[in-house]
Image (cartoon, grey):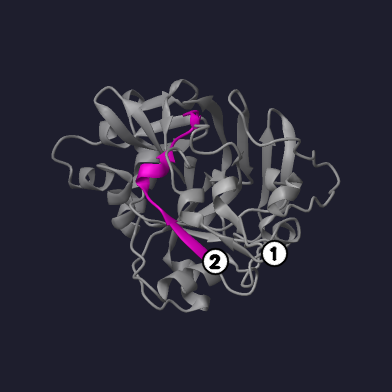
Amino acid sequence: MKVVRFTGADGPRVGLLEGGVIVDALAALPEGDSARRYFVDTQSFIRAGEDGLKAARRLIAEAPAAARRPASGAQLLAPILPATILCSGSNYHAHNAEKANTPISGKEPEFFVMTADNVVGPDEPVVYDPRYTTKLDCETELAIVIGKEGRHIPRERALEHVFGYTIVNDVTARDLQVRRSPEGSVWYEVGRGKMFDTSAPLGPVIVTADEIPDPQALMLRTRINGELRQETSTSDMIFSCAELVHFFSTGITLRPGMVIITGTPAGTAWSNDAELGGKWQAQPGLVRASRYCLPGDIVESEIEKIGILRNEVVHI
């Protein structure tokens, strides 16, 4: 099942995407139907658990024509606005090989946090603000949407807590993120480097976990202006999705609607920036970045079984 948010006549609506058609969940349910509470927003749908999924499957099969609309004409929004986005960095073997690393890179999950204030949806602009950064980089990442509450979740049960998966473009201000001492040691200031306006494009859909039984077997790609910059399998993650759910749950209770992003593979513009410790590793088919992102660039973040998230970089 694919879950979307789209612009309706009275504001954002929850939709169910099937075969190029969106079922408007609220429009399909009569006033007074108890299932309407499941579709007030995406978080309500996720919190409804199996009851919400059963209602959604019924709507996909039985919704009247008046509640269906072509996806091609819909203005899609970010499918969820998560209050908390837990972010794992330096989580692909190949990405670690192409950049400057901190002493813990690849040895334990490196993490930072973003919020709904950073999120934009499909086809919304990524802001280029030269007063903030001139080294704006883009990274396609698989995002885990939590479906069931838990703390100290064991690895072997972790995927039971997943509602579904979506795509995040982890937009990064590299000149604010990567710091080097005169002695040559490296550290990351991920607060300023990662958390700013439009730094978390998210979407275009959430695919429920039953359609992605193995999140470590998905192809991931990034294209900028049509050039293939990143292409790899999520099997190259250092810490798997299950391990990241376990890791984050040791510190805080994971709740429905939280999102975990899982890191990016090789092919970033950072890899071509020797000043910041970049070490480009040539890979068949990939185009070496000649610069960081600039206004007018079109970024396409693609993950198998989920889709393509497109955003244009625009000058503030």
Residue appearing at x 66%, y 48% in the figure: 220
Depth check, front residue: 18 or 72: 72
Amino acid marked by disc 2: Glu
Q: Where is residue 240 shown, x and y percent of the image?
A: 60, 67
The image quadrant of residue 25 is top left
Magenta region includes residue 304 = no
Looking at the rendering, the stretch of residues picked out in magenta corresponds to 110-128
Which label sits in the foreground, 1 or 2?
A: 1
Mark 1 or mark 2: which comes first in sequence? 2
Q: Where is residue 87 shown, x and y percent of the image?
A: 49, 58
Residue appearing at x 48%, y 68% in the figure: 245
Is 219 left, or right, of 3 in this rendering?
A: right
Secondary element under disc 1, as helix, strand or loop, is loop
Q: Where is residue 300 shown, x and y percent of the image?
A: 62, 35
Residue appearing at x 83%, y 41% in the figure: 285
Marks 1 and 2, how far apart at CA: 20 Å
Label 2 sits on residue: 110
The image quadrant of residue 216 is bottom right
Q: Where is residue 143 shown, x and y percent of the image?
A: 51, 53
Secondary element under disc 2, as helix, strand or loop, is strand
Magenta region includes residue 112 = yes
Residue 17 seen: yes
Depth check, front residue: 295 or 160: 295
Label 1 sits on residue: 184
